[in-house]
């Protein structure tokens, strides 16, 4: 009998073997539960108790994890699952009606549920069919789904740039075979890392970590996850910490509605991201890194695992990279369905095997991150740009955009434009340029009414702000950049109805840790339900304004705080719609 097994309450061989695979490490709790669910369909109370005993953690802690993440099931599921997105891009394209149709059409062998944005907005209405990415899904597609479940629908092709694009990170999208390191190498992968380590084509000396940080700082690149913190400054804080080990964590949670740029970056050029992570690790003195990728991106997670294995086999990652003294190991960690895990401190909690609830900050991850150690947390896009900055220099980067907001950005464009999709261009574009130059103008017969910019945690923007240059400072002028997403709405879209969908999203995704957000998002959604149904009460506007103020001022983390932004901007521009 295994020494850990309690005689009076034994742990089954299956759970014991699984826990043993992870050295009975409680940090692996999420992976262990994911594996049990994968083989058994759902997590029974018995299994939850066994996992607790096997890892020597309280059962309620395991239960807390099993019920926190939406991709974990504690009740039996039908044979097939269909999870239809109900976030704005899919909502605009009839996702609610599609779900109703699916519920009435698919038999008892299907569980049909709603889901927050799946990061497949360019395939709206999008769904996960037995965890496989599908879209666009229409009634016809649903009917044939019964016959064809299990096959993938094709991804949009981003090989050809649109007129006016300035491509750096996407330069080789569609040309590189993302499953092949060799293919990436022919397009220049790992040249920046080789140069930094003094192993480049010339016989130059290694570039010091300090110089790398200086270059990234001078370039002026700011974080692309939404908050816009300078990347080089963050690295300098971690580099200055004497404590080791240090970590580099790539935030690939990408759950902001309307945002899917990181998905495209990972699936078109996974080695570019890995090289960026390796350069970050070299700069700050880390030897281990994690890619925290949302659980719904299974295809992309597998591509990354394959890319890591190939890079390790060829000496671009792992021990003594390119025969230098520098070693760096990367692991892929799958989330399990929770928007809040994109918030960096919640992400770190989740990475440590806990519920993804935000931490009190300070201390910030740069001093106390993964396991309390100095940690760089950067967005996929921030890291994907790094090899290009290191290779071409800070001046080259600063020359790409406008002086106040240098560099290119990947934007996602959705809604009533002729050519929705994704493109790379300098920062500082106006909404008019986005719609006219990159979106091909409004769809035939559509007239612009407003845009939602930045993501769900963004601003509602009317036509009189079409000429504001959009960058990290433009939120003060009423147009937020956020993660670079634009939903263009014509006159058929009610701002109140859209706001109702956004508040529904925040309500569902609130982690529940603090009262202003847990209760405030629900109450705001209830008011918007009424207003959208034309049943508003005279006091609704004042109550909603008060809730927005409370959310922004008193919520514990950015989720609750930013839920106020679309409400406040809608009040400014569409006040009469609120009664
Ligand atoms: C509710 C919430 C969700 C977030 N989701 C993401 C996300 O999906 N991806 C991301 O990179 N950053 C996200 N962030 C921002 C991160 O907390 C953090 O600022 C970012 O990962 C830092 O990387 P960067 O400096 O390279 O942008 C989110 C923040 C909040 C408050
Ligand atoms: S603001 Fe919302 S998401 Fe953030 S800690 Fe509070 S309840 Fe959780
Ligand atoms: S996948 Fe539906 S809005 Fe993003």
Image: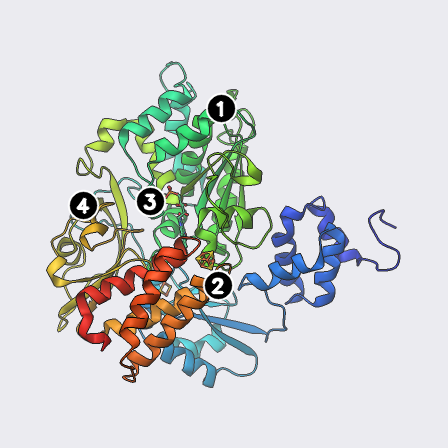
Badge 2: residue crowd in 10 Å (few <14, some 14–19, many ≥20): some
Residue holding disc 1? 322
Q: Which mark is residue 132?
A: 2
Helix, strand or loop at mark 3: loop
Q: Does the residue labelled 3 lie within 8 Å of ligand 1?
A: yes
> At 56% across and 38% down in the image, what residue appears?
372
Label 2 to label 4, Cα distance in Å? 36 Å
N-terminal-most mark, 2 or 4: 2
Q: Does the residue labelled 1 lie within 8 Å of ligand 1?
A: no
Label 1 to label 2, Cα distance in Å? 37 Å
> At 57% across and 79% down in the image, what residue appears?
109
Label 3 to label 1, Cα distance in Å? 29 Å
Residue holding disc 4? 428
N-terminal-most mark, 2 or 3: 2
Helix, strand or loop at mark 1: helix
Residue holding disc 3? 224
Residue 373 placement (x, y as % from top left):
54, 34
Foreground residue, 282 or 124? 282
Badge 1: residue crowd in 10 Å (few <14, some 14–19, many ≥20): some
N-terminal-most mark, 3 or 1: 3
Residue 358 placement (x, y as % from top left):
49, 51
> At 74% across and 50% down in the image, what residue appears?
56
Give the quarter of the image for residue 42: bottom right
Quadrant holding the C terminus: bottom left
Q: Considering only vertical position in the picture, is 206 above or below 58? A: above
């Amino acid at each position: 009998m295994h020494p850990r097994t309690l005689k009076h309450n034994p742990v089954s061989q299956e759970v014991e073997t699984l826990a043993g695979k992870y050295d009975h490490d409680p940090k692996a709790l999420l992976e262990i539960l994911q594996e049990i669910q994968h083989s058994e369909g759902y997590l029974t109370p018995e299994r939850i108790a066994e996992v607790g005993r096997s890892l020597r953690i309280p059962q309620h802690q395991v239960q807390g994890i099993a019920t926190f993440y939406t991709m974990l099931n504690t009740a039996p599921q039908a044979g097939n699952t269909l999870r239809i997105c109900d976030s704005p891009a899919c909502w605009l394209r009839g996702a609610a009606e599609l779900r109703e149709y699916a519920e009435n059409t698919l038999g008892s062998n299907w569980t049909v549920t709603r889901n927050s944005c799946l990061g497949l907005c360019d395939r709206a209405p999008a769904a996960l069919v037995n965890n496989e990415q599908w879209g666009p899904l229409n009634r016809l597609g649903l009917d044939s789904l019964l016959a064809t479940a299990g096959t993938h629908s094709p991804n949009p092709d981003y090989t050809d740039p649109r007129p006016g694009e300035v491509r750096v990170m996407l330069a080789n999208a569609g040309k590189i075979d993302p499953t092949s390191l060799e293919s990436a190498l022919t397009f220049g992968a790992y040249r920046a890392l080789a140069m930094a380590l003094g192993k480049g084509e010339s016989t130059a000396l290694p570039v010091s970590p300090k110089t790398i940080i200086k270059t990234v700082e001078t370039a002026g690149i700011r974080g692309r996850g939404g908050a816009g913190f300078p990347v080089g400054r963050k690295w300098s804080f971690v580099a200055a910490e004497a404590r080791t080990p240090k970590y580099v964590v790539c935030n690939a949670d990408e759950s902001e509605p309307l945002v899917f740029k990181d998905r495209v970056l990972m699936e078109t050029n996974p080695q570019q991201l890995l090289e960026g992570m390796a350069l970050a690790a070299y700069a700050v003195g880390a030897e281990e890194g994690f890619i925290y990728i949302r659980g719904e991106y299974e295809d992309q997670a597998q591509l990354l695992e394959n890319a890591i294995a190939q890079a390790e086999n060829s000496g671009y990652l792992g021990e003594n990279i390119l025969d230098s003294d520098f070693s760096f190991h990367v692991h892929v960690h799958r989330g399990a369905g929770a928007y809040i895990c994109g918030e960096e401190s919640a992400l770190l909690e989740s990475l440590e095997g806990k519920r993804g609830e935000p931490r009190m900050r300070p201390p910030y991850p740069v001093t106390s991150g993964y396991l309390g150690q100095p940690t760089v947390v950067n967005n996929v896009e921030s890291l994907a740009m790094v090899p290009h900055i290191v290779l071409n220099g800070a001046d080259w980067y600063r020359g790409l955009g406008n002086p106040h907001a240098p560099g290119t950005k990947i934007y996602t464009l959705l809604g009533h434009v002729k050519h929705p999709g994704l493109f790379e261009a300098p920062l500082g574009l106006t909404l008019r340029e986005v719609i006219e130059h990159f979106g091909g103008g409004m769809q035939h017969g559509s007239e612009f009414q407003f845009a939602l910019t930045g993501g769900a945690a963004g601003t509602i923007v009317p036509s009189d702000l079409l000429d504001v240059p959009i960058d990290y400072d433009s939120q003060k002028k009423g147009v937020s950049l956020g993660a670079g997403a634009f939903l263009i709405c014509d006159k058929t879209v009610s701002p109140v109805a859209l706001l109702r969908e956004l508040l529904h999203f925040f309500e569902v995704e609130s982690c529940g840790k603090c009262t202003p957000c847990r209760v405030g998002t629900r109450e705001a959604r209830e008011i918007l339900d009424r207003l959208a149904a034309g049943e508003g009460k005279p006091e609704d506007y004042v109550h909603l304004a008060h809730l927005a103020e409370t959310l922004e001022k008193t919520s514990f983390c950015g989720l609750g705080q930013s839920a106020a932004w679309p409400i406040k901007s809608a009040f400014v521009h569409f006040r009469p719609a609120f009664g």
